[in-house]
């Protein structure tokens, strides 16, 4: 197969074995890209499918205006349109609530809300529930209580990392459950120099590898002056990231959490084109 891209990229990509079809079969798009004040519904699901993407993560960070798991009409509309369009809800991002609140009464209420959101996520077909747990003792208590209340559920909880992936890997190890892992957001991480390691060719692969078996989900996007750019609009070392995913045997979704910088249509188009553009740039080492 002809190898595209510059010689350095081709050398770095040695060992890549994913075809465009392999990536597309796992490609997903988060509704975080949609306007937060507009409810997710049939129109948004249809736009994602029209772009050629068949997997979606419903973002609950802008609850209740964007997605409200208490709103049975909205939940039913999303589920119905997904069935009609052949789209799978594979993950749900939980609400931005204080999982580590020091006031016990509030923290218990948070657990109740998060469990309710996770149960609706499971009803929608999702296997991953994403949350911004801080890597501390109160969050650890919350996760344990959520896991206990969700015993028997097919949903798996994930913690979205902050600036140091090692802190969150250690947090997952302290929880010690195969129903709890990491969602690696490649825009949050920083090295000691405060630079994102995923834009460094010499650091991207080893940084992603820190997740190891704990990695259950991804939030991918490009990085330039900030994060959440559409793919190939920034400096992320995509070949190194995918080599690391192969190294650790990651089999989950290739989920993009890009935010529209020009238009939603442009972001959808660039995300949908990622599999072919990835292979065009880096080629494959077919064995």
Image: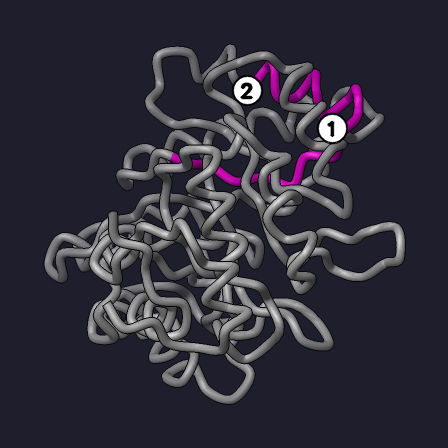
Q: Please indicate whether residue 283 sits to the left or right of residue 167 in the image.
A: left
Crowding at label 2, few (<14), some or many (≥20) Cα neighbours within 10 Å?
many
Q: Mark 2 points at which residue?
A: 146
Is residue 133 within the magenta segment? yes
Against 66, residue 235 (above or below) is below
* Front position in the image: 276 or 253: 276
Numbered circles on residues, count: 2
Classify residue 3 by image quadrant: bottom left
Classify residue 152 by image quadrant: top left
Against 257, residue 280 (above or below) is below
Residue drawn at (43%, 43%) of the image = 70
- Do the residues under discs 2 and 1 have CB atoms within 8 angstroms? no
Is residue 259 within the magenta segment? no
Going from N to C along the chain, the mark reached first, 2 or 1, is: 1
Crowding at label 1, few (<14), some or many (≥20) Cα neighbours within 10 Å?
some
**Observer able to see residue 230:** yes
Residue drawn at (39%, 30%) of the image = 119
- Percent across and percent down for residue 247 are 47, 37
- Percent across and percent down for residue 129 are 46, 36
Split into 4 quadrants, where in the image is the N terminus? bottom left
Label 1 SS: helix
Farthest bottom residue? Answer: 262
Label 2 SS: helix
């Amino acid at each position: 197969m002809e190898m595209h891209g510059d010689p350095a990229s081709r050398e770095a990509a040695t060992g890549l074995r994913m075809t465009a079809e392999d990536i597309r079969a796992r490609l997903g798009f988060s509704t975080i890209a949609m306007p937060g004040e507009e409810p997710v519904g049939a129109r948004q699901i249809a736009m994602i499918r029209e772009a050629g993407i068949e997997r979606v993560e419903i973002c609950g960070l802008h609850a209740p205006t964007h997605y409200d798991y208490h709103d049975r009409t909205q939940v039913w509309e999303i589920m119905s349109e997904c069935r009609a369009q052949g789209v799978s809800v594979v993950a749900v991002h939980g609400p931005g609530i204080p999982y580590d609140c020091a006031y016990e009464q509030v923290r218990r209420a948070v657990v109740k809300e998060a469990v309710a959101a996770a149960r609706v996520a499971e009803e929608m077909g999702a296997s991953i529930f994403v949350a911004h747990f801080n890597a501390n003792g109160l969050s650890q208590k919350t996760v344990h209580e959520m896991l206990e209340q969700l015993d028997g559920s097919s949903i798996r909880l994930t913690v979205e990392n902050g600036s140091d992936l090692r802190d969150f890997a250690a947090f997952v190890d302290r929880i010690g459950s195969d129903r709890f892992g990491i969602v690696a957001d490649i825009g949050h991480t920083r090295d000691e120099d405060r630079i994102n390691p995923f834009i460094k060719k010499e650091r991207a692969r080893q940084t992603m590898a820190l997740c190891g078996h704990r990695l259950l989900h991804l939030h991918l996007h490009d990085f330039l002056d900030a994060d959440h750019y559409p793919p190939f609009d920034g400096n992320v070392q995509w070949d190194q990231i995918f080599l690391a995913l192969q190294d650790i045997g990651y089999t989950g979704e290739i989920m993009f959490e890009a935010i529209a910088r020009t238009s939603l249509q442009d972001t959808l188009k660039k995300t949908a084109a990622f599999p072919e553009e990835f292979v065009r740039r880096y080629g494959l080492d077919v064995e």
